[in-house]
């Protein structure tokens, strides 16, 4: 199996809505619908699905939330193909022009480095990926503007709703079992290792239609426990001398 799509679900109605939205009358062998049958939560359920896909021989994994639908008229297979193209090596701007006009020593043309991509992240329309305070201030459907380029050496909030990566990134691609920070903290330690090993993240993956907003008050209760730690956690991970997954994972305040 070359690629797989992993979708975590717990509500049968939402599961059927996902399949219907993507025009799937039957479930293809490369789609792994991972049920949260024991109420273990999103992170553990996604990790089980990713592990199943890897064990089945998938070399590229696409992870979608069950409320993410086609943005345009693409099929799920076409969505995967767009992510796979996004996973190809990308040019990353690494040389800065610091004066205008450019000062002596500024290259005229060569300002980028071609890098392998650790993960492709796509964005979402309709319902933005806001935290609870942001949703309360802006409204869940306020349009977001997106940075669409490859990034290296800088930390960013990785959203696990619509991402793709190669299976060789296990265990770095594991979601962290902390509600509302499962993909964010996954991203911080993954970015540390990816940058150390000369990889970038491509933030120009395919778009999805995010169809559903979660309960803002439940989100606020979950986020309040870790907002203060999240403010500086990326910096602590960046400054750490640790290089193993286990050692970096141990820096998380859980």
Image: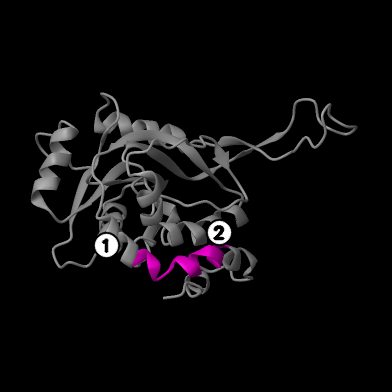
Query: Seen in the image, is 113 located left or right of residue 232?
Result: right
User: What predominant SS class does the magenta segment belong to?
Assistant: helix
Residue ID for mark 1: 218
Question: Which circle marks residue 96 in the picture?
Answer: none
Q: Is residue 127 visible?
A: yes
Q: Which residue is mark 2?
A: 193
**What's the distance in space between the residues labelled 2 and 1, CA to CA?**
32 Å
Q: Is residue 50 above or below residue 142?
A: below
Q: Position of residue 54 (x, y in %)?
A: 32, 54
Q: Are marks 2 and 1 in contact (CB under 8 Å)?
A: no
Question: Which residue is pictured at 37% across the width and 38% down the height?
Answer: 142
Q: x, y (%) of residue 126?
A: 31, 36
Q: Nearer the viewer, residue 71 or 32?
A: 71
How far across and how far down the image is residue 80, in percent? 33, 35
- Seen at 30% across and 50% down, the residue is 57
Q: Quadrant of residue 52?
A: bottom left
Magenta segment, which residues?
222-234
Residues packed near mark 2 inside 10 Å, few (<14), some (14 to 19) or many (20 plus): many
- Residue depicted at x 19% and y 33%: 22
Residue 175 appears at what percent x and percent y?
37, 60
């Amino acid at each position: 199996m070359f690629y797989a799509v992993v979708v975590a679900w717990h509500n049968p109605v939402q599961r059927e809505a996902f399949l219907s939205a993507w025009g799937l009358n039957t479930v293809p062998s490369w789609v792994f619908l991972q049920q949260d049958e024991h109420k273990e939560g999103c992170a553990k359920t996604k990790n089980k699905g990713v592990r199943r896909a890897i064990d089945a021989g998938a070399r590229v994994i696409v992870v979608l939330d069950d409320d993410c639908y086609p943005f345009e008229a693409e099929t799920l297979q076409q969505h995967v193909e767009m992510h796979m193209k996004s996973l190809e090596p990308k040019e990353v701007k690494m040389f800065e022009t610091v004066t205008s006009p450019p000062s002596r020593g500024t290259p005229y043309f060569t300002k980028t480095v071609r890098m392998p991509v650790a993960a492709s992240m796509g964005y979402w329309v309709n319902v933005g990926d806001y935290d609870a305070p942001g949703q309360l201030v802006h409204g869940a459907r306020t349009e977001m503007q997106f940075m669409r380029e490859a990034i290296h050496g800088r930390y960013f909030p990785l959203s696990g709703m619509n991402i793709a990566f190669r299976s060789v990134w296990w265990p770095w691609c594991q979601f962290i079992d902390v509600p509302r920070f499962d993909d964010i903290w996954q991203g911080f330690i993954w970015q540390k290792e990816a940058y150390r090993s000369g990889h970038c993240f491509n933030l120009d993956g395919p778009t999805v239609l995010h169809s559903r907003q979660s309960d803002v008050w439940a989100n606020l209760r979950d986020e309040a426990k870790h907002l203060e730690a999240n403010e500086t956690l990326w910096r602590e991970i960046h400054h750490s001398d640790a290089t193993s997954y286990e050692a970096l994972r141990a820096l998380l305040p859980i």
